[in-house]
Image (tube, rainbow, N blue to C red):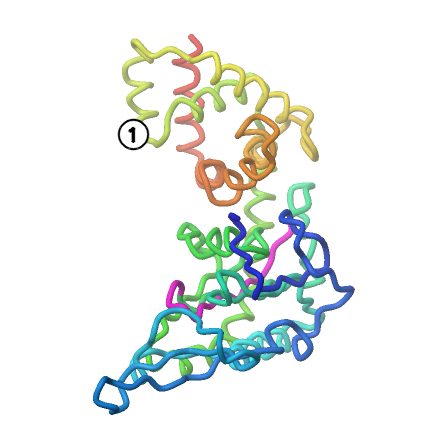
Amino acid sequence: MAHNKTAIDCQQGLRQAWHGLTQILSKILLPESWLAKWDLVKSPLFSADGTESEYCELVCTDNKSIRVGRPVHKETYGFLSNADFLAIVRDSMELIPGAIVESLGSVCARGRIFVGISVPEVKELKAAGRVFYPYLNFLSSHDMSAPFLVNMSTVCPVCDNTFRANLHDTENKAFRVIIPHTKNAKMAVANVPRLVDCYCGTAAKFAAIMDSMANESVSTSQAERFFAGFLAAKDDNEANRIVTTRADGIKISTRAENQRNRLVELFVSGKGNRGNDRSDLFGAITDYYSHESSGGRDVWKQIASSEFGSGQTSKDRAYGILQNNDRTDLMIRAGDALLV
């Protein structure tokens, strides 16, 4: 399954995740959590002549027959145990009064572990009249598939796909700390709690950006042209070509026209939208690419697109464009050339 939650994995959360496999708890306490119930230890490997190898296996403390990942080098691999991982999360949470664990678990046969926390003060981050749900996520791996990572995101980890969505969110410039599993990893990870203080400031920055968008008025006519340009041009260079050539030989497809019409509807009357400003443009795009862009009734296909596929790419691109006057105007002019 796409969630990559095996029989030896578990995901605990305060609410049911999309995969329907969450162990729902009213409160998640780190010392009593799934990741505290087992850990990994290094088990030596031996060469054919009986001498101990420079490599070792990682085996689970609750069942020594469970081996996680490939053998690792005893010296150069920065092994981060569950206990070490949870200690970093705990120390970070202590710096943020009221922090709550929203989701915790392992996937990929215990190869990847994660904790997603929220903070009451910004749990429902209000900006431009809308509500967003930011999470501070801690990720790591025992199978060398991912570094130790902490980021701020609107995607809470509940499975391997949401793990990857945060792991590969390279456009996230707000708060993102990556520490490879090298031999000095534990020393570097020890500094993470100090960096976590940036979290609330990052949330405030996002709110400020959304509020600034709300101060930039947009008419319905401008919205129609913006969406036309946004759908037709995949980047600024393509938008410039459309403007320069006055869209010579370029036609809007029936699908793109339907998408544009739906985006305009969401701009005017989508959830939290009033059809007044740039925050409504962003709200329409977020709504559409989160819930409708993949088409059909395949819920997983929509989740895949929304959180780490083309839908997420489109939302990230719109977020960057709408913070910049010149880029927003370029998309409107490209749309004007196409519609004319």
Q: Is residue 119 left or right of residue 136?
A: right
Q: Estimate the x, y position of residue 232 in percent, counting from the top left.
A: 40, 22
Q: Is residue 320 visible?
A: yes
Which of the pair 78/332 is nearer the observer?
Answer: 78
Identity, as a three-letter code, of the amino acid under mark 1: Asn
Q: What secondary structure is marked by label 1? A: helix
Position above or below: 131 against 267? below
Position above or below: 45 against 6? below
Quadrant for the C terminus in the image: top left
Which residue lies most toward the right here? 26
Magenta stretch in the rendered image: 133-146
**Residue on which disc 1 sits:** 237
Q: Is residue 134 left or right of residue 172?
A: right
Count of numbered marks: 1
Which of the pair 292/69 is nearer the observer?
Answer: 69
In which image quadrant can residue 100 be found? bottom right
Q: Estimate the x, y position of residue 158 in percent, counting from the top left.
A: 59, 56
Q: Is residue 103 left or right of residue 185?
A: right
Q: Estimate the x, y position of residue 94 in percent, counting from the top left.
A: 64, 78
Residue at image point 48% right, 41% down = 312
Position above or below: 325 against 158? above
Residue at image point 57% right, 74% down = 89
Q: Is residue 46 left or right of residue 92?
A: left
Which residue lies most toward the bottom here? 51
Q: Is residue 215 visible?
A: no
Which of the pair 247/17 is nearer the observer?
Answer: 17
